[in-house]
Amino acid sequence: MPILLLLATFVTTLFAGSFLAGGNPFVRPADLLLGLMFNVPLLSILGIHELGHYAAARHHRVDVTPPFFLPAPSFIGTFGAFIRIRSPIPHRNALFDVGISGPLAGAVVAIPVLMIGLSLSAVRPEMAQGGTTLGESLAFQAVARLVLGPVTKGFDVVLHPMAFAGWIGLFVTMLNLIPAGQLDGGHIAYALLGDRYAEVARLVPYALLLMGMAWVGWFVWAALLFFLGTRHPRTVSDELPLSAGRKILGGVAVLLFLLCFSLNPFPIGRG
């Protein structure tokens, strides 16, 4: 099943990438090749993210499935990927490792992909620009300035499909680090806070509701957390303390969330 889902997601993201690159594979089948500039880097980011979780889980002898990719009729061709944990987590150190390994691994791939994609992107006058306007996280702004330098006022960056894949990688990293429920951020927050986790996590859906005033997608995430709940199961040996090094890495996770954060990732703009 994981292999079949990966193949299906490869096809759906290939079609999506072709359209993003300006092709139309239904009219010109050869245009499918254009989709490789998008789907290969995107699936690499998502795959390495999930393999980070998988490797950490296996290191701690936690029973876990291979990654399941989700094909979708969306504009990027997928709803992402996930792994299933099929045995209890032994302690909070293991939980922390499983939670943080995915976002760190995914970001390590997403940033080089974004850098290469930006080097292939075009800077054009705003009036010549079409398509979708994207929000810019601090990480995106820093990488764009490093690769492209300052962009003159009145000009916009028209993202190459590879750069868009890198942008999505940072966006997915941020979403996964939301500190609630079964998200990566929920695992990390529980490992850091222990019994105090519930006090923080129950506030997250309400914060997302307020953020929904900027982007309607936050309403969807708030609804999901209200429906699925923000609680997190205890580990087997929950009394074992988190190591000092992992507490420092927890700060790195918070910083990564802030750097990838965009309050309004899909603002209504030109095009």
Image (cartoon, helix red, strand yellow):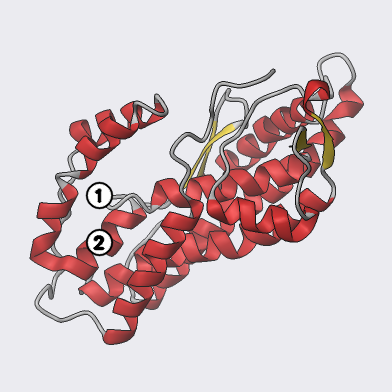
Q: Residue furthest bottom?
A: 244
SS at mark 1 in the image: loop
Asked if marks 1 and 2 touch (Cβ < 8 Å), the reply is: yes
Labelled disc at residue 14: none
The quadrant the C terminus occupies is top right
**Which residue was labeled with disc 2?**
189
Residue shown at the point (45%, 50%) measured from the top left: 174
Residue shown at the point (81%, 31%) measured from the top left: 21
Residue shown at the point (91%, 27%) measured from the top left: 30
Q: Residue furthest top?
A: 27
69 relative to 44, above or below: above
Q: Of 270 and 71, which appears nearest the observer?
A: 270
Q: Do we see residue 68 in this rendering?
A: no
Q: Quadrant of residue 246?
A: bottom left
x and y percentages locating residue 249 in the rendered image = 38, 75
Count neighbours of disc 2 (C-alpha within 10 A) and say few if under 14, some if 14 to 19, many if 20 or more: many
x and y percentages locating residue 261 in the rendered image = 46, 48
Q: Of 37 and 72, which appears nearest the observer?
A: 37
SS at mark 2 in the image: helix
Q: Is residue 198 left or right of residue 146?
A: left
x and y percentages locating residue 92 in the rendered image = 22, 72
First in sequence: mark 1 vs mark 2: 1
Labelled disc at residue 180: 1
Q: Do we see residue 257 in this rendering?
A: yes
